[in-house]
Image (cartoon, rainbow, N blue to C red):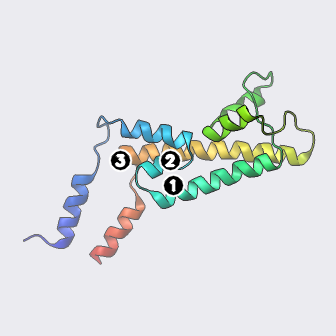
Amino acid sequence: MATTAQQSADRQQIAQRIPGEKSSVPAFALFLGWLIPGGGHFLLGKYVRGTLLFVSILGLFLIGLGLQGKLDSFGADDLLDKLGFVGQLGSGLMFLLAKVMGWGASTVSITLQDYGTKFLLFAGLLNYISAIDAHALATGRKADLADDIVTVKRVA
């Protein structure tokens, strides 16, 4: 008769995804994670991580708007503005909504506005990392440490 630890290890091994296995879940987790901060983690059932990411990215974005940060556009002549646009676009739906509604400053005239622009940029970059993390979890390329900790506690 197999021990409880062996049964737990067997179940965990069966439940693991095979890297390269065809599924639309990783791509959808990546897209949803970009569109809504933490959305990919919510899709995968990682509610605490998704909530923390949503709150932190939304907080960065709102602070940036509160400081009247500039929302960059790709049509600008300056290369740094184009790169800033790509970074800010990482905020997904928040960035698109802010662009449509005309929020943010059109130019940066004081130092606080420059700080606001950096907050908007960091929100987008953090959301890119978050979406890629959700994709890695969905494909099985990244082990979830929380599952490993729970398994160790059950065995001990």
Amino acid marked by disc 3: Gly
In the displayed structure, 152 sits above or below 104; it is below
Q: Secondary structure at mark 2?
A: helix
Residue named by callout 3? 140
Amino acid marked by disc 2: Gly
User: Which residue is located at x 22 percent, y 66 percent?
Assistant: 8
Q: Secondary structure at mark 1?
A: helix
Q: Give coordinates of residue 88: x percent, y percent.
A: 68, 38
Dividing the picture into quadrants, the one containing residue 138 is top left
Left or right: residue 126 versus residue 30 is right
Residue 91 visible in the current orientation: no
In the displayed structure, 97 sits above or below 3; it is above
Q: Secondary structure at mark 3?
A: loop
In the displayed structure, 151 sits above or below 102; it is below
Amino acid marked by disc 1: Gly
Q: Nearer the viewer, residue 106 or 76?
A: 106
| Contact check, label 2 and label 1, Cβ < 8 Å | yes
Dividing the picture into quadrants, the one containing residue 97 is top right
Residue named by callout 2? 39
Identify the mark nearer the N-term, 1 or 3.
Answer: 1
Left or right: residue 8 versus residue 55 is left
**Residue 50: which disc?**
1
Identify the mark nearer the N-term, 3 or 2.
Answer: 2
